[in-house]
Amino acid sequence: MKTSNGPIGLFDSGVGGLTVARAIARKLPKESIIYFGDTAHLPFGEKSSDAIKTFSLKICQHLIKNGAKAIVIACNSASSVAFDYLQERINVPIFNVIDPLIDELQKLKPKGIGVWGTHATINSQVYKHKLEKSLPGTPTYSLATPLLVPLIEENHLNGEITESIIQYYLQESKINNIDHLVLACTHYPLIASQISKHLDMRITLLRTPKIVADWMAIELDNLGLLNKEESAVNHSFEVSDYTETFKKISRIFFGDGIILQEQNIWKSTDSV
Ligand code: DGL
């Protein structure tokens, strides 16, 4: 049985999940975070479901070995294709980033929903199926927007190239038919303000990291897993392949004091 003062484990392919990690750190300031960015396998969105499942399981085992009391799959691609698979195989509570967004959309009663995500997320049709169930009759327009992740990982958060790709994807979206746009990739909130700039005023861009953090606060509380002690918060950040961008963005989010470690978990033979 995991104790309530262990860290919350989060993982993604790279910097994207840091958007969720920061929102959780803000919402739950007593919680320590252990974050793993699988930069060696980035982008997840272009990998097969089997590959994403294999990477995700190994990362979860590593996070649990390092004390994670619960795990947030801070990646829509892995949430789409690996959530059930992981839930059956690991022994701590695990959460995806999709259910909180579906729940929020249900409250917002949208007339039409646009979903931007990676190929893995869009091809899985998880959003489409969940939305058909929770908001029957509401049209959903999904678009794979794979050029955005490499741009973000290269730290092109603004500028001409980023702007023109955003505009290109907006032209490809059925923008006249939607009033809510879901950034169904945890990297995309890093360019949310650029997307907003080109977005019609009547379209609401969902604040996905905050929605996930609010959901996690309730879920962890329900499970009795929130830290009640005044112990010092200790965040740790690991990547499978060290990158300067990861270092830069993690410091923007969590300050200069953070320690980033390269951890090649693919060499070890851990199991839970
Ligand atoms: N940030 C991830 C997601 O939410 C993965 C992006 C990628 O590596 O392709 O889907």
Image: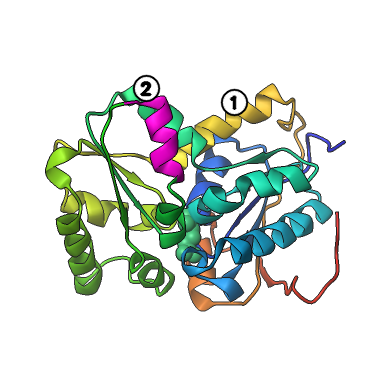
Q: Which residue is mark 2?
A: 107
**In the displayed structure, would residue 65 be above or below residue 213?**
below
Q: Would you say 49 lies left or right of 177 here?
A: right
**In the displayed structure, would residue 197 be above or below residue 119?**
above
**In the displayed structure, would residue 3 be above or below residue 50?**
above
Using the rendered view, name the quadrant where residue 260 is placed.
bottom right
Amino acid carrying label 1: it is Ile
Q: Residue at x 45, y 38 (%)?
A: 210
Q: Would you say 98 lies left or right of 114 here?
A: right
List x then y, in percent, for residue 186.
45, 53
Q: Earlier in the sequence, mark 1 or mark 2?
A: 2
Q: Would you say 67 lies left or right of 32 here?
A: right
Mark 1 close to ligand 1, CB under 8 Å: no
Q: Residue at x 54, y 70 (%)?
A: 247
Q: Nearer the viewer, residue 164 or 247?
A: 164
Res. 218 mark: 1
Whether residue 123 is visible here, answered yes or no, is yes
Say which quadrant the N terminus sits in.
top right
Using the rendered view, name the quadrant where residue 131 is placed.
top left
Q: Element type at marker 2?
A: helix
Amino acid carrying label 2: it is Lys
Secondary structure mostly seen in magenta is helix
Q: Residue at x 86, y 59 (%)?
A: 271
Q: Would you say 40 lies left or right of 118 here?
A: right
What are the residue bounds of the magenta stretch? 126-136
